[in-house]
Image (cartoon, helix red, strand yellow):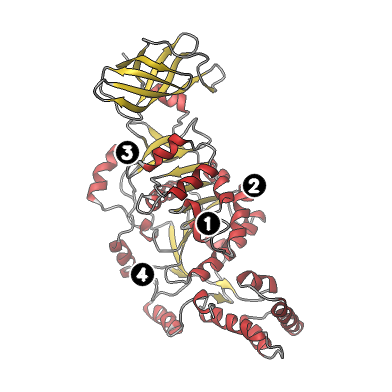
Amino acid sequence: MYKLVGTISGEVGLHEFDFVVTSDIKRNEYLKVWNELDGWVLGRVDSIVDVDEKTATAEIIGYKDERGFLMQPKSTLARDTKVFKADQAFIIEILGLKLGGIYLGMLEGRNIQVYLKKEELIQKHCSILAKTGSGKSYTAGVLIEELLDKNIPLLIIDPHGEYLTLKYENKSEEERKQMEKYGITPKGCASKVVIYTPSNFSINPAADKLFRLDGVNLSVKELYDMFPLTDAQLGILYQCINEIKAGKEFYTVEDIIKAVSESKSSAKWRIVHFLERIRETGILSDSPTRIEELVQVNKASIIDMKGADPKLQQMIVYRICKEVFEGRKMGKIPPFMLVVEEAHNFCPERGFEKSVSSNILRTIASEGRKFGLGLLVISQRPARVDKNVISQCNTQIILRVTNPNDIRALSQGLEFMSSEMEEEIKRIPQGVALLSSTSIEMPILVDIRVRKSEHGGRAAVMETVEKKKAPKNEVQDVIKEKEGKKGMLARLLGE
């Protein structure tokens, strides 16, 4: 038997109706109303208009026709029609919620699990946008756990070391108490997660391996992509590298520095300065980290760039993205998901700062799906992320956003955003997200499930350090090798 919650009265339109409340309800409660022409119609409480007079307004979501399409009623609902609380099966049918896939959480206010199709995440991209402290990284951790459970390869760009604790099971007593509600148990991903550092083990003691870029046979184009060059400087590099190639099959940055230093042009010193600084970071190597190692089935590779200068981070992201995109096109690596945290730093909106990694991320956003390269972009500043990248994401997970510029950017970049949605995301409670996806009929509010793994706890990081398996003398050798080398790239390029 359906629970009666009210009767239609007052204003009635094609997209909403007012009703007199006869039972306790709350905002976003799902309702069902009978319409003679269309049958049962799903609605949702939009607002409680008058608490004293017990009146409310409901948004009309629609009904499914014989083809299974979501339709709006052909006529307005009749006054005095009874309004009932919608049952679980009807909500699932009308909203198009499916069982199985990437388990994100529960439909807010209902015991209905919400899933995303893993194929959609990889083929059609996803974004997680929220103000600082609203749970964007936590939500990303939930998605990463689910993707790892489905054996999807992951490559995670982690500027601040936020995802190291994926290795460890969630030990939060408060969150463990909630796990039964979501039907999950604590679980770490230590066997599937490998942490790489472009710095060294003294800066990132929790890292498992060093990350290095290929420093052999650097081309003029690769160097030009790393830093701006004048025509005179380009000419010097072309000449020097061509001369090196004439005498050597393989050459390193040391060879380029030596050749440029011997040039008679006064424009050489800026190039020498840059090349020396990039050499000092230690990021270039004749034994680089291969993309075949980074992208493997049932593995998440985290590039923990904590301690690296922002400009060096951008250069690393550029080189990684370029290599994995080409590698995926050539079939060298399996289909995978690229996760970019702090995306506004690596693909900023035009008019803000510039980043060498912007163009390749735009390319991946627009073309990656054709080659099985999925993109997950995460940012607390939606207004500063390239709109072309955001607009290519067919799945949007938006937590609380209050900055007017960010809200304006979302409205301009996302088709489903309305004035009502703008107000909604300003007051979304902690742990709840507005979800829009092509597999779901309309944007819904989702209570994000708790993490199976640890989130951001320093204890887990220290445990990683204590259990580190790298031989002590190897770690000391790396530390000694890097000792005294200052900063990373851009800090030294401001001269």
Q: CA distance from mark 4 to mark 3?
A: 32 Å
Q: Position of residue 341 (x, y in %)?
A: 46, 57
Q: Position of residue 356 (x, y in %)?
A: 59, 65
Residue underneath mark 3: 183
Q: Quadrant of the C terminus?
A: bottom right
Residue 230 visible, this orientation: yes
User: Who's the residue at 38% across and 43% down the image?
Assistant: 426
Q: Nearer the viewer, residue 491 or 139?
A: 491
Q: Amino acid at mark 2?
A: Lys
**Whether residue 163 is situated above or below residue 288 in the rendered picture:** above
Q: Residues within 10 Å of mark 3 (few under 14, many from 20)?
A: few
Q: Amino acid at mark 1?
A: Gln
Label annotation for residue 319 = none
**Whether residue 354 is situated above or below residue 57 in the rendered picture:** below
Between tags 1 and 3, which lies in front? Answer: 3
Residue underneath mark 1: 296
**Residue 436 in the figure: left or right of residue 108:** right
Q: CA distance from mark 1 to mark 2?
A: 19 Å
Badge 3 or badge 2: first in the primary sequence: 3
Q: CA distance from mark 1 to mark 3?
A: 29 Å
Q: CA distance from mark 3 to mark 2?
A: 35 Å
Badge 1 or badge 2: first in the primary sequence: 1
Badge 4 or badge 2: first in the primary sequence: 2
Residue underneath mark 2: 370
Badge 1 or badge 3: first in the primary sequence: 3
Between tags 1 and 2, which lies in front? Answer: 2
Q: Amino acid at mark 4?
A: Lys
Badge 1 or badge 4: first in the primary sequence: 1
Q: Position of residue 275 (x, y in %)?
A: 59, 81
Residue underneath mark 4: 468
User: Who's the residue at 61% across and 62% down the image?
Assistant: 323
Disc 1 on helix, strand or loop? loop
